[in-house]
Image: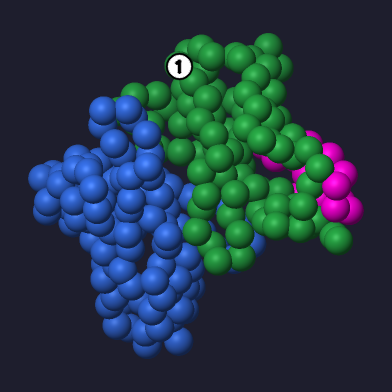
Amino acid sequence: AQKVTQAQTEISVVEKEDVTLDCVYETRDTTYYLFWYKQPPSGELVFLIRRNSFDEQNEISGRYSWNFQKSTSSFNFTITASQVVDSAVYFCALSEAYTNAGKSTFGDGTTLTVKP
Amino acid sequence: GAVVSQHPSWVICKSGTSVKIECRSLDFQATTMFWYRQFPKQSLMLMATSNEGSKATYEQGVEKDKFLINHASLTLSTLTVTSAHPEDSSFYICSALLASSYEQYFGPGTRLTVT
């Protein structure tokens, strides 16, 4: 069975601070996908990143960066110089690869509040 | 990226009635679609896998007779909540799998309120 743990339920920071959202996962699969999604109050999921299990390279996209550590089964997400618009619920998710890629297991989410 | 739509975006129905939610892949064909449910301030939970031309596969604990899924075409899957009750009030989100890349695209969700 797959499991995703986001230990931080809520995080509150002041604008321009850096913030890291933690994600730890469990799976018996050797090939899998990891995801991060943003869910603003409207409810629509915003895709942020997908990482294949065999690709441990860290990724940076603007103010966002992701650190994938297979040895510790973690896939952490850092927002640099946070902004008020970053306030949302962030979900880490895990899925099997290939034809079962749509069967995702989500963490409980981290609610990020960025104060001006 | 590919686009998935849902209709309606929100619906209010009376207890005991049935409501149908549509999920469409607008610019690609999807042999496999998925239905998730999200209760307020909770995570998304996979309900079922919808396969074009065959029966849906339901996750443990999901009543297949209550949540009817039909995937009659490569671009449309429907979820019908039969005899809805207030505890069925939730945010229902579908996704479609782009087979060429195994990428999953989510719809915008449908908020169901049963009174």
- Between residue B57 and residue B6, name the one nearer to us: B6
Q: Position of residue B63 (x, y in %)?
A: 33, 58
Q: Chain of mark 1?
A: A
Q: Position of residue B101 (x, y in %)?
A: 32, 27
- Chain B colour? blue
In the visual, does B72 lie left or right of B30?
left
Label 1 crowd (10 A; few <14 / some 14-19 / many >=20):
few
- Between residue A44 and residue B20, name the one nearer to us: A44
- Chain A colour? green
Q: Position of residue B59 (x, y in %)?
A: 38, 45
In the visual, does B21 lie left or right of A34?
left
- Between residue A99 and residue B62, name the one nearer to us: A99
In the rendered view, tell whether residue A25 sits above or below residue A21: above
- Between residue B54 and residue B106, name the one nearer to us: B106
Q: Residue at x 45, y 87 (%)?
A: B115
In the rendered view, tell whether residue A112 sits above or below residue B40: above
Locate the N terminus of chain B by quadrant.
top left
Instruction: Kindly tell me whether residue B70 is visible in this rendering.
Output: yes
In the visual, does A71 lie left or right of B6?
right
Q: Position of residue A31 (x, y in %)?
A: 45, 16
Q: Which residue is mark 1?
A: A31
In the rendered view, tell whether residue A27 sits above or below residue B69: above
In the rendered view, tell whether residue B67 sits above or below residue A25: below
Q: Residue B23's quadrant in the figure?
A: bottom left
Q: Amino acid at mark 1?
A: Thr
| Element marked by disc 1 | loop
Instruction: Provide the residue span drawn in magenta.
Output: A5-21
Q: Is residue A2 magenta?
A: no
